[in-house]
Image: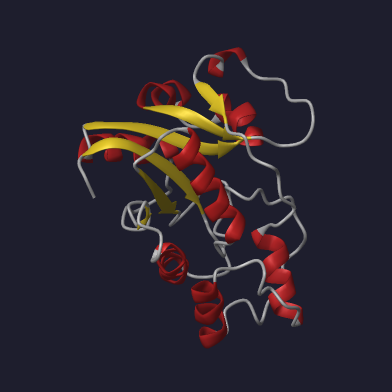
């Protein structure tokens, strides 16, 4: 990957990655003139309390398969290879060190933007990256701390979530229209998600 340019940082457990994740990345590339989007696969996300269903290596393989035909997207294992909980501020700092001449943009949902002041080192996050926000339905109260630090993408919200995809796979329902073909093949070949029916939750398409 080039050491210069505009890099979008799109983090999540991606358990599994699905078409809406790719659509978000495409919107960010087009609207923010990004040269590349890094899909940062969470290794030990502190907010998930180890509640991932596929292993980190499988989730990285799924993301790699999903972006294999996307020349401006790339899977990153920076959080998988770092021991301990993975905090966004640390990831952005590491990426800035690796790509000092690149401008970073952090891609998150509107719900995450509202919560960002409660994240680890929010001021450090805002100093390292511009925020690109995926809109969500509803009226959101934007904290003063993030005002002026973000742009909202034009994007139609989707009800698709990784939780719903896992549920469908577990009960034998089709997910063909929701996943890239290479991702579906990997899941089917390894029987991922067949044995568990996760509880319903409000997974957001850019943070699951």
Q: Nearer the viewer, residue 65 or 23?
A: 23
Left or right: 105, with 193 as reference point: left
Residue 71, percent from left and from top: 35, 56
Which quadrant holds the C terminus? Answer: bottom right
Q: Residue at x 31, y 34 (%)?
A: 93
- Position of residue 80 relative to residue 136, above or below, is below
Does the image show residue 161? yes
- Position of residue 183 relative to residue 5, above or below, is below
Does the image show residue 197? no
Q: Residue at x 50, y 47 (%)?
A: 26
Q: Residue at x 61, y 54 (%)?
A: 20
Residue 77, percent from left and from top: 34, 57
Left or right: 60, with 138 as reference point: left
Left or right: 201, with 192 as reference point: right
Q: Nearer the viewer, residue 34 or 187?
A: 34
Q: Quadrant of residue 92?
A: top left
């Amino acid at each position: 990957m080039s050491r210069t340019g505009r890099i979008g940082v799109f983090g999540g457990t991606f358990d599994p990655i699905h078409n809406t994740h790719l659509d978000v990345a495409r919107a960010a590339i087009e609207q923010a003139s990004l040269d590349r989007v890094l899909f940062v696969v969470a290794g030990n996300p502190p907010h998930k309390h180890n509640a991932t269903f596929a292993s980190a290596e499988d989730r990285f393989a799924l993301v790699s398969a999903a972006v294999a035909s996307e020349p401006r997207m790339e899977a990153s294992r920076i959080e998988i290879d770092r021991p301990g909980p993975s905090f966004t501020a640390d990831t952005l700092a590491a990426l800035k060190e690796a790509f000092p001449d690149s401008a970073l943009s952090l891609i998150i949902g509107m719900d995450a933007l509202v919560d960002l002041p409660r994240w680890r080192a929010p001021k450090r996050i805002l100093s390292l990256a511009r925020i690109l926000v995926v809109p969500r339905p509803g009226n959101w109260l934007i904290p003063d701390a993030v005002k002026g630090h973000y742009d909202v993408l034009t994007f139609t919200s989707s009800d698709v979530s990784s939780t719903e995809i896992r549920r469908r796979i577990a009960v034998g329902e089709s997910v063909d229209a929701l996943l890239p073909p290479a991702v579906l093949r990997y899941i089917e070949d390894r029987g991922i998600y067949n044995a568990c029916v996760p509880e319903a939750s409000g997974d957001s398409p850019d943070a699951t």
